[in-house]
Amino acid sequence: MELQLGLALPANNNFPTKGGLDLNINDFPYHPTITDSNNNKNKKRSFVQAFESSNATSTVPRTLPWLLWNNQPNDDDDDDDTKYNSRYTIMVKNEEDGLVGWPPIKSWRKETCFHIHGDGGVRHNRSVEVNGGGVSTFVKVKMEGVGIARKIDLSLHHSFETLVRTLMHMFDKCQMDSDNYELTYQDREGDWLLADDHDVPWRTFMRSVQRLKLLKRMSSTY
Amino acid sequence: MLKMASSFPEEVLEHVFSFLQSDGDRNSISMVCKSWYEIERWCRRRIFVGNCYAVSPRILIRRFPDVRSITLKGKPHFADFNLVPEGWGGYVYPWIVALASAYPWLEEIRLKRMVVTDESLELIAKSFKNFKLLVLSSCEGFSTDGLASIAANCRNLQELDLHESDVEDLSGRWLSHFPDTYTSLVSLNIACLGSEVSFSALERLVGRCPNLRSLRLHRAVPLDRLSNLLHRAPQLVELGTGAYSAELRPDVLSNLSSALSACRELKSLSGFWDVVPTYLPAVYSICPGLTSLNLSYAIIQSPDLIKLVSQCPNLQRLWVLDYIEDVGLDALAVSCKDLRELRVFPSDPFVLEANVSLTEQGLISVSEGCPKLQSVLYFCRQMSNEALITIARNQPNFTCFRLCIIEPRTPDYLTLEPLDVGFGAIVEHCKDLTRLSVSGLLTDRAFEYIGTYGKKLEMLSLAFAGDSDLGLHHVLSGCDNLRKLEIRDCPFGDKALLANAAKLETMRSLWMSSCSVSYGACKLLGQKLPRLNVEVIDERGHPASRPESLPVEKLYIYRSVAGPRFDMPNFVWTMDENSALRLT
């Protein structure tokens, strides 16, 4: 995108003077960084798509003759990464809580209302509901890097394989990605353990699991 | 003309000016001529400072020598959601010191999101002989010891309101520091406290203050104590219960019912922690008179909620958890035709799957059934463009519309498209909209709509939205009345900000966190616009230690006549013409 900015008054007198700053005056180098963070690929259109879509032409504001946007994607984005999914990093300060400050609920309200549902409350992460057909066992599942947790009914599964496959599907991951994550669970004592056939028998897991977490594998080469 | 102006004695002009209370009007008359400026500044009694760093105490005192009421706001709004690191600032003590020496007749102090110490409270208690009102809204840094000073010394205190402040609760004894001779209490809000207070001290206090109109208790006051308090204060207009539970004894319900029914002036109810639904019928007798009901801490299921709201035909304000569900909001739409404000909070916000049946349908119902509805805060998990368009058409009178779809970037659940068109309808139809918070999947197009139609927008909150700088540009160039803009996790970088730099001087403040504004751009803004304080917040260390093109963590820009502040912690840097020279 080419920007031509100046400090001169615009020709159009109908809008209030909005001073812009010339990027070139101070020899200001502009290298936007594109850092991929969120894995919600299919929820966001790529940068290229967004800019080249017909929407882009119709959104050129008419009232600013001295600010020109052409229809090309950022020419100065000389980043080799073709994944223009996000140009920002989400700061996930605290993995346990997911996104900081989201949903936007006042901290006071959170402490007042949710200390009984809080993450530390092992009891409340697992809920057993008795339906007409039988007993379902829901546990919370978090995936590293994803803000909002999910819930899964463990009673529908009989092996780690099906469980992991379902979880990947829940978080919109494909089978390849499942190799990049390992499943961990928190037991009754509050300890986090690996959830796979090598480490724990399925039955033991089912009896003691309180909640699940999918962590990125530290290294892809073992 | 000059002759005419001087032929009016000052006292006459002062008297005329006294009918003008709004700051805007007072600012206007002070600009008519020098003598009006002088007269006005001597008789202005109420001051509102929307950003405590926008002006200094010295400048304020120099212009307005006789102030009786002051409001100060400190931290940016996003501090409510833990986005502003601890130690950022907003310290009230230097203000209190200055006010104490300049305004011995100060009567009212209202603070929001400021750091208040016990020292500050002690100074307030000792400095202002006619002190009447203290409101500490979402403040922190003080303990119950500070409250004891206030209670012990402020003989004429009428209002003490600790609205949602973070108080270090050392003990409940502070309440007993109100002397036996103290009888002027009108309003007390201690809902945020934790420790037990002496119930007998509370009862005696309530009993000897005949003008008590508003009493908001905290969780530690159990239901069986409430009746005793109410018997002593049947004139209450506003009541916040403590814990709404007690052992199931037959007399509790009957005592409470009769105590409440004796309160014929009661218009506002809140509290309701730890609700035992068996006791809800106690409030039925006063429901018809209620205009405000805050059930946002009450875990009450939809059937009980419906029973309650159906008996409140005069309800104007309802705050409730999403346990009310769509069916409850349908009932609300039928029963409460006078509803002005609705807030629906999430009961289980940290999980994707809905635990209750609350959808866009509930909001559609109220927008259809409540013709006076003006202000909405709605947490939900699904929304559609169709629903938003319907809501906008139903209720073009919205002045405040805040929608929070819990999962970021959620598209229209019917079409999987962005919610641009839906929010576009909101800003287009609601011509008086002054506050807007958006959520869900939004492209730059949404911001084009907001910039085009949101001409009266004063406050805008954005999160996880937009595609490019074009989005921010639409907002900054289109929203003529924008005062506060807060943005998190949006792909906005330098271009829109620099292109609209002058706009920032017309606004109170801009907050951007987890966006793509580079350190270089921040420096440029700070250098070129001396009337702005450009503050970079970065807990990774000085931004100069990284390439200039890298984005800063957080950015807070606000206009100020006081220049850069000097009370910044080591993770905040001001960008100004000297920032290149400063090392830390």
Image (tube, rainbow, N blue to C red):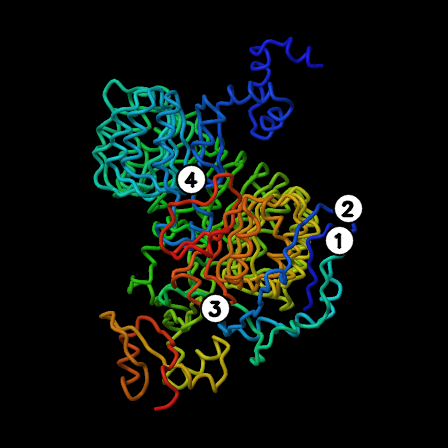
Alpha carbon distance from label 1 to label 2: 8 Å
Q: Residues within 10 Å of mark 2 (few under 14, many from 20)?
A: few
Q: Nearer the viewer, residue B348 or B357?
A: B348
Q: Mark 4 highlights which residue?
A: B112
Q: Mark 2 highlights which residue?
A: A14
Chain to which the residue tagged by mark 3 belongs: B
Q: Is residue B424 left or right of residue B532?
A: right
**Amino acid on which disc 4 is placed:** Lys
Which quadrant would residue B546 be assigned to in this image? Answer: bottom left
Q: Do marks 4 and 1 share a chain?
A: no
- Residue A163 picture location, percent across and down: 40, 81
Q: Considering the numbered disc 2 on the image, is that residue within a helix, a strand or a loop?
A: loop
Above or below: residue A100 compared with residue B45: below
Q: Residues within 10 Å of mark 1 (few under 14, many from 20)?
A: some
Residue at the spot 30% in from the left edge and 31% down from the top edge:
B227
Q: Nearer the viewer, mark 2 or mark 3?
A: 3
Asked if labels 2 and 1 touch by Cβ distance under 8 angstroms, the answer is yes
For the C terminus of chain A, give its image quadrant.
Answer: bottom left
Q: Residues within 10 Å of mark 4 (few under 14, many from 20)?
A: many
Chain to which the residue tagged by mark 4 belongs: B
**Amino acid on which disc 2 is placed:** Asn
Alpha carbon distance from label 3 to label 4: 37 Å
Q: Considering the numbered disc 3 on the image, is that residue within a helix, a strand or a loop?
A: loop
Q: Earlier in the sequence, mark 3 or mark 4?
A: 4
Alpha carbon distance from label 4 to label 1: 38 Å
Chain to which the residue tagged by mark 2 belongs: A
Chain to which the residue tagged by mark 1 belongs: A
Above or below: residue B114 compared with residue A1: above
Q: Considering the numbered disc 4 on the image, is that residue within a helix, a strand or a loop?
A: strand
Q: Mark 3 highlights which residue?
A: B547
Q: Mark 1 highlights which residue?
A: A63
Q: Residues within 10 Å of mark 3 (few under 14, many from 20)?
A: few
